[in-house]
Amino acid sequence: MSQPTAEPPSGRDRLRELLDAVLHEDNARLSDMAGQAHASPFHFSRTFSRDTGESPVALRRRVLLERAAWQIGQGSTVTDAAFTAGYESVEGFIRAFSRAFGHPPGATTRGSGRWLEAPNGVHFHPPFHLWVEEGSPRRSGMEPTVLQIHHDVDDTTHLIELASRLSEEEYRATRAPGRTVLSWDGPEESIAHTLGLLVKSKEVWLASIEGADFPEPAADDPDSLRERHRAAGARWIATVDDIGRRGAWGDRLIDALCDPPESFSLVGVVVHVLTFAAHRRQLVRQMLREAGVAVDHGDPIEWLQNHYGGTT
């Protein structure tokens, strides 16, 4: 019989494999964690500690305390937070929490003391996610991407304004039957649907990054889209600016709502949004022309000339 190993199967996200085993709700003991990873407790603990700089039990305890702090800040009772974090007594939880955060759980306020010091950058990210910080900040070299972010937001605003001149019938007319850009979004056959997904994409990713709830369905008429985009566009620019300022492009968001959980780097999220936003803006242009609306090319060179005189 071959020896058990903590190495994940080829092609899997190795960090995700290890964290899944450590943070699974039922894996309170090292033997449980190792069993999920098909490893002996010794090999699992050694591999995990080597790769993260923290023992499996210590990381689990810390992340669950971070989650407890967030829950209390959201209005949970100390008792509920204690048992959710796996403590057998409230007194033991209060001692551990006070030692970790420097104040008792009852003194926790919304947004206070959410992250504890960690050797690996792995932290709880509300409501059900993990956040993985990159080890050290560095210059991003992402200035062209920052310009693309601004161009995307400005250009989407421009297209919404052009679409607002259409009749309701023209705005919602099916112009590309069955056309699908991303399978999980389904067909987007009209100007209304494609513009709506342009705005919704940013709303969804912002919610994930900020730890907010998944956005509720919202109206997609031009006036509503204008207001939704004004809010999401400003938040999106500020979020990307903050990522660049901190040199945090390599930070990872682990989405535990996916089955199995998936991890996304922040740079990957931004490039994803930019790629499909650019594609959809051109699709909207094509449909606007079919509706008889005169529309420009959406060329960022022209946008730069108009806004910056051709220089950055």
Image (tube, helix red, strand yellow):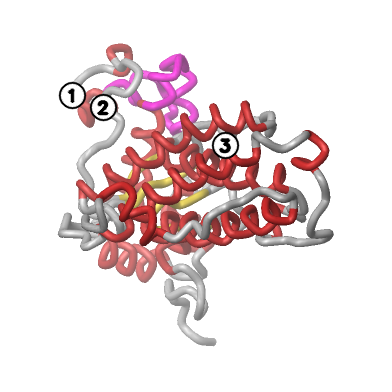
User: Which of the two discs, 2 and 3, labels the residue nearer the N terminus?
Assistant: 2
> Which amino acid, mark 3?
Glu
Rendered view: 207 above or below 93: below
Dot 3 corresponds to which residue?
161
Q: Is residue 134 visible?
A: yes
Mark 1 vs mark 3, foreground winner is: 3
Q: Kindly state the secondary structure of the residue where label 2 is placed.
A: loop
Q: Is residue 21 visible?
A: no
User: Which of the two discs, 1 and 3, labels the residue nearer the N terminus?
Assistant: 1
Left or right position of 253 against 165: left
Q: CB of mark 1 within 8 Å of CB of mark 3? A: no
Q: Label 1, label 3: how many angstroms apart (C-alpha)?
A: 52 Å
Please provide the residue range marked out in magenta: 70-95
Left or right position of 170 against 104: right
Rendered view: 204 above or below 76: below
**Badge 2: residue crowd in 10 Å (few <14, some 14–19, many ≥20):** some
Q: Using the image, tell me which numbered label, if any, was put on residue 113.
A: 2
Nearer to the camera, 96 or 257: 257
User: Which of the two discs, 2 and 1, labels the residue nearer the N terminus?
Assistant: 1
**Badge 1: residue crowd in 10 Å (few <14, some 14–19, many ≥20):** few
Dot 1 corresponds to which residue?
102
